Image (spheres, helix red, strand yellow):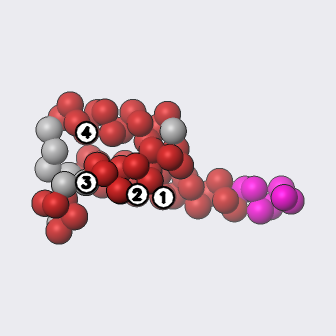
Amino acid sequence: MIPSTISLVGTIILILDVFAIFSVLLGRSSSMRKILWFAIILLLPFLGMGLYFLFGRSSEDARA
């Protein structure tokens, strides 16, 4: 890959991670659950974001 493509992919992942973190913080989950998902997203940026949107959101959060 060329450097500009790598930086574009990194920027997209960063934007999606920020969106996931805001989704975690604005959700209706318990504080401990929010902290756990926040840490997972920060430690595993691409995988953590995907896992959160697949498994972490409750049905109440998905409607909000």
Most frequent secondary structure within the magenta stretch: helix
Q: What are the residue bounds of the magenta stretch?
A: 1-7
Residue 57 disc label: 3
Give yes or no for contact between labels 3 and 4 (Cβ–Cβ under 8 Å).
Answer: no
**Residue placed under numbered mark 2 in the picture:** 19
Label disc, if present, on residue 16 of the rendered structure: 1
Mark earlier in primary sequence (3, 1): 1
The magenta stretch spans residue 21: no
SS at mark 3?
loop
Name the residue located 31 percent from the left edge and 33 percent from the top edge: 36
Amino acid type, label 2: Phe
User: Is tag 3's residue or tag 4's residue first in the polypeptide sequence?
Assistant: 4
Residue where numbered disc 4 is placed:
34
Going by the picture, which residue comes out furthest to the front? 55
Q: Where is residue 31, by image quadrant?
A: top left
* Residue 10 position in % (x across, y down): 65, 54
Task: Specify whether 2 is left or right of 6.
Answer: right
The N terminus - image quarter: bottom right
Q: Are marks 3 and 1 in contact (CB under 8 Å)?
A: no
Return the x and y of residue 25 as percentages of the image width and height: 26, 47
Q: Residue at x 41, y 36 (%)?
A: 40
Circle 3 or circle 4, nearest the eye: 3
Amino acid identity at mark 4: Lys
Real-space Cα distance between discs 3 and 1? 15 Å
What amino acid is at disc 3?
Arg
Q: Visible in this render: residue 8?
A: yes
Name the amino acid, label 1: Leu
In this rendering, the answer to whether 59 lies above or below 48 is below
